[in-house]
Image (spheres, rainbow, N blue to C red):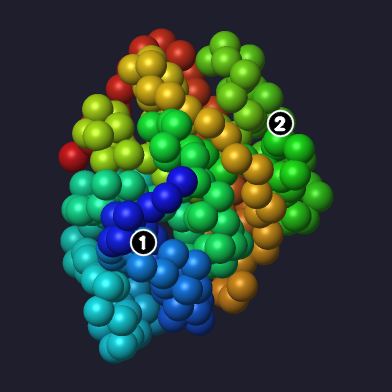
Amino acid sequence: MTIRSSSVSVVIPSYNEKDNIAEAVGRICSALGDALLEIIVVDDNSPDRTWEIVQNLNEPRCRLIRRMDKRGLASALADGTRAANGSIVVWLDCDLGIPPEDIQKLIEKMDEYDVAVGSRYLPGGMDTRNKFRAFLSTIFNIYARMLLGWSFRDWTSGFAAARKEALLQVPLTSEGFGEYFVEWVYWCRKKKLRMVEVPYRYGLRKSGVSKTDGSLRVFLRLSIQYAWRVLTVRMGRRSATT
C-alpha cells in the first residue's frame, strides 16, 4: 500500500511501562516515518510515572492521555482509538513483545481490506512465550473458533489495524481486559467488514512484569473471563463501548 503522509494513528496503552515506553515510541516512529500522524499513549496514571516519560519525550507526534480515574486495557484502547485522527488506526501493546516494525505488514493490507489482524497461528507466525502459556493460548483460540463458527485463527491477538470508518461501525468495547478483541473481531465479521490475518512472531516483553503472567490467580481469573466472553458473544450480546 502507498500510504499518504501523516495518515496513521498508533494507540498504545500503558501501565508501569517506564522501561519500555521510550523505545516503543522511537521504534514506531522509525517504522512508519512520514506516514505516522500520531502516537497516542493511554496511561492509567502509572505509579512508575510512565506518563512523565511520555511528557518529556522530544517527539511532537506523540500525545498522552493520562487517565486519573479509569483503569483497564479494554477501556484504554477504546478511549485511544476513539481519540485517533488518522484514516488508519493501529493498536498494540507497548511492552515490545509485538515488534513495532510489524505495523507496516498490517497497513500494507489496507488498500484491500477494512481490518488487518496480526496472527500468531498462520504460517510464518509464532508465539515464542513459554510453552505452557503458548499452549493455553492455542487451546483458547481453538475453543473460540469452535463456538463462534469461523476459521479466523487469532481471536486474542490484540494487534490490529483498521480503517477509521470500520471503527465507527464497530467501536472497541470498554469492558474487560484482552477479551475485548474476541468480541470486536466477531462483530466486524457480522458487519461484513473485509478482514485479513497477517502472520507475526509474538515474543516476550522487553522489560517489566506481565499483567497476566505474573500471578497464577490473575491468570486463572482472566481465563474464566475470556471463556465467558466467548459464550456471551455467541449468544449475541454486545458490551458497552463508552
Residue 199 shown left or right of residue 106 in the figure: right
Up/down of 11 relative to 27, above or below:
above
The extreme right residue here reads 131
Mark before the other along the chain sequence, 2 or 1: 1
Up/down of 192 relative to 52, above or below:
above
Element assignment for label 1: helix
Image point (49%, 23%), residue name = 230
Residue 170 shown left or right of residue 96 in the figure: left
Q: Position of residue 1 (x, y in %)?
A: 46, 46
Residue at image mark 1: 35
Which of the two marks, 2 or 1, is nearer to us in this view?
1
Up/down of 165 relative to 149, above or below:
below
The quadrant of the rendering that contains the C terminus is: top left
| Mark 2 residue type | Ile
Image point (68%, 59%), residue name = 203
Element assignment for label 2: helix
Count residues near mark 1 (Cα–Cα under 10 Å), then give few for <14, some for 14-19, many for 20+: some
Q: Where is residue 120, by image quadrant?
A: top right
Residue at image mark 2: 139
Q: Are marks 2 and 1 in contact (CB under 8 Å)?
A: no
Image point (36%, 61%), residue name = 35
In this orientation, which residue lies closer to the viewer: 36 or 121?
36
